[in-house]
Amino acid sequence: MKKWLCLLLVGILVLSLVACDSKKETETPTNDTGLVDEFKSIIDMYEEIVYIHKMYNPSDSYEKFSDNFSQEWYDEIFSATLIGDVSKNRYGYALTDLNADNRLEMVLLLEDYTIIAIFSIVDEKPFLISDFHHRRSCWLDKDKTIHISGSNGADDWTYSEYKLSSNGTELILLFEYGCEGYDNISNKKIYYMISDSNKIYIDEHKITDLHQAKPYLSLSEAAKNTERDASLTFISFEK
């Protein structure tokens, strides 16, 4: 009797271990160091852009890939690539699940954690969610909130917080504040805030409080926040 009981317990233990291993296989890590196959085309495209840009006319490379990348992102890549350190090892990526759907997004970034672009996978192909440059900075926090500071001038700027949609195709606005320019009548700056989809106009005192609580950050400051808070692992293009 004891022998059969022991065999039964061993069988239960084996089945439990198999179930645990199966669960581990189906779970997607929040930050992986392996490249998702669908994202490999982004790396290949980057290498081809660099080759065309260095060997031929830079405008040729933009025309060829303009459907995939905005002019700003293109300029950001080459302004950094062709000035100073021209090796591509300062460029890389990190993989992380931004919308808790057990699928990884690719954060394209520099070695100092300056974010250049964010890609998801839509219909088994890489999808450009957004790109960033010197007038539009981005950083990620530990809660996977996407912070974006953008400016078209001293009197036209925004600070926004987003979450990635469940299907990975768009950014959902959580909160925003900014400046819309000047009121022609009062000649005062027009400040506003958006929360829970409601837009209200606010005064300078409220803006001062918001600046302290949710500061508008430059590209370099945003990079420091991402490196500190987002738990991303930078993987260089050059292995």
Image (cartoon, grey):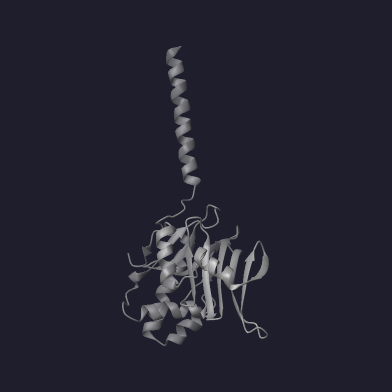
**Residue name at image x 42 percent, y 56 percent:** 231
152 relative to 58 in the view: left or right: right
Which of the pair 88/133 is nearer the observer? Answer: 133
Percent position of residue 53, x then y: 40, 82
Q: Residue furthest top?
A: 1
Give the residue at x 57% y 70%.
Answer: 205
Pick the residue in front: 162 or 153: 153
Q: Quadrant of the C terminus?
A: bottom left
One can see residue 26 in this view: yes
Quarter of the figure with residue 83 = bottom left
What residue is at 63 percent from the left and 84 percent from the top? 187
Q: Judge by depth and name the residue closer to the eye, 156 or 12.
A: 156
In this rendering, the answer to whether 10 lies above or below 123 is: above
Q: Measured from the top left, where is residue 103 in percent x and y?
A: 52, 55
**How many marks do you count on the picture?**
0
Residue 171 seen in this snapshot: no
The residue drawn where x is 49% and y is 79% is 72
Residue 192 screen position, x and y as percent = 62, 72
Q: Is residue 174 left or right of residue 71?
A: right
Percent from the top left, x then y, of residue 169? 59, 64
Image: 106 above or below 48: above
